[in-house]
Amino acid sequence: MDADGASLLTKREEDLVRLVADGLGNRDVARQLNLSENTVKNYVFHIFEKLGISNRVELVLYALNNSKRAPMSVPDDQSPTTMDRAQKR
């Protein structure tokens, strides 16, 4: 997940973090990764320890700050402000 390619987390842990960051709870993460809910809880606990964090909000912030995905952007002519002005004309 780190921009330089050196991650503190395993691939499996990164997959789990992405799902948590997408808003899934432990039960849904378990279904997605074909794991037990208890295993997901253990993963989350170990990820918290590795990253020195204590809750899911911090985990989501970590995921956002270390995402390999390019940030989403909206073309200038499609921004809500531009579209509002166009609709008023």
Image: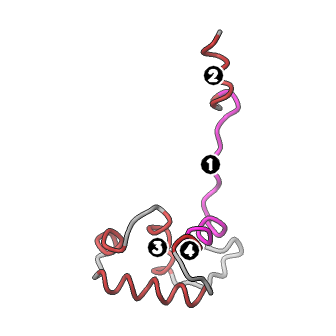
- Looking at the picture, does residue 23 appear above or below residue 87? below
Identify the mark nearer the N-term, 3 or 4: 3
Element at label 4: helix
Q: Position of residue 74 (x, y in %)?
A: 64, 38
The colouring scheme, among rainbow, by chain, secondary structure or one colour, is secondary structure
Task: Please state which of the two labelled residues, at mark 3 or mark 2, is closer to the viewer.
Answer: 2
Q: Nearer the viewer, residue 15 or 42?
A: 42
Image point 69% across, 71% down: which residue?
3
Element at label 3: helix
Identify the mark nearer the N-term, 1 or 2: 1
Task: Please state which of the two labelled residues, at mark 1 or mark 4, is closer to the viewer.
Answer: 4
Local packing at callout 3 (Cα closer than 10 Å; few below 14, some 14-19, many 20+) is some
| Numbered marks: total | 4
How far apart are the two marked residues, 1 and 4, measured between alpha carbons? 20 Å
Element at label 1: loop
How far apart are the two marked residues, 3 and 2, measured between alpha carbons? 38 Å
Amino acid on which the number 1 mark rests in the picture: Met
Q: Position of residue 32 (x, y in %)?
A: 32, 69
How far apart are the two marked residues, 1 and 3, measured between alpha carbons? 20 Å
- Looking at the picture, does residue 10 appear above or below residue 67? below
Identify the mark nearer the N-term, 2 or 4: 4
The span picked out in magenta is 59-77
Residue placed under numbered mark 1 in the picture:
72
Tell me the quarter of the image containing the N terminus.
Answer: bottom right
How far apart are the two marked residues, 2 and 4, measured between alpha carbons? 35 Å
Identify the mark nearer the N-term, 1 or 4: 4
How far apart are the two marked residues, 1 and 2, measured between alpha carbons? 20 Å
How far apart are the two marked residues, 3 and 4, measured between alpha carbons? 13 Å
Residue placed under numbered mark 3 in the picture:
15
Residue placed under numbered mark 4 in the picture:
59
